[in-house]
């Protein structure tokens, strides 16, 4: 699996909440938390898109 970098800016309140959530879940880092969220959400969006296309 190739690794790539994603760099973005976000509101400090969002970052603080994400850091707290990540710690509460026992994640090793904020990056681990964000990657997990992106992976799960993108898979869900893609699956939903495919289901909707079959319904048409």
Image (spheres, helix red, strand yellow):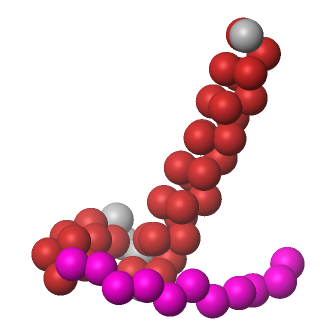
Farthest residue, direction top: 55
Q: Is residue 31 magenta?
A: no
Q: Measuring from the top left, give residue 51's x and y in whole percent.
A: 71, 22
Name the quadrant containing residue 39.
Answer: bottom right
- Is residue 28 something one can see in this rendering? no
Q: Residue at x 35, y 85 (%)?
A: 9
Q: Is residue 8 magenta?
A: yes
Left or right of residue 14: residue 28: right
Please determine whether, in this image, residue 46 is positioned above or below residue 6: above
- Is residue 44 something one can see in this rendering? yes
Name the quadrant containing residue 19.
Answer: bottom left
Please determine whether, in this image, residue 39 is positioned above or below residue 13: above
The C terminus, quarter of image: top right
Q: Measuring from the top left, give residue 35's x and y in whole percent.
A: 54, 70
Please determine whether, in this image, residue 3 is positioned above or below residue 52: below
Numbered-mark total = 0
Farthest residue, direction left: 13
Span colored in magenta: 1-11
Q: Residue at x 83, y 83 (%)?
A: 2
The N terminus, quarter of image: bottom right
Left or right of residue 56: residue 39: left
Q: Nearer the viewer, residue 11 or 17?
A: 11
Q: Nearer the viewer, residue 19 or 4?
A: 4
Farthest residue, direction right: 1
Q: Residue at x 68, y 41 (%)?
A: 46
Q: Measuring from the top left, give residue 54's x and y in whole percent.
A: 78, 16
Q: Dominant secondary structure of the magenta stretch?
A: loop
Left or right of residue 25: residue 53: right
């Amino acid at each position: 699996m190739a690794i790539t970098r994603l760099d973005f800016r976000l509101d400090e309140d969002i970052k603080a909440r994400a850091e707290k959530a990540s710690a509460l879940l026992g994640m090793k880092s904020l990056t681990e938390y964000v990657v997990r969220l992106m992976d799960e959400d993108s898979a869900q969006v893609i699956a939903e898109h495919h289901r909707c296309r079959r319904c048409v």
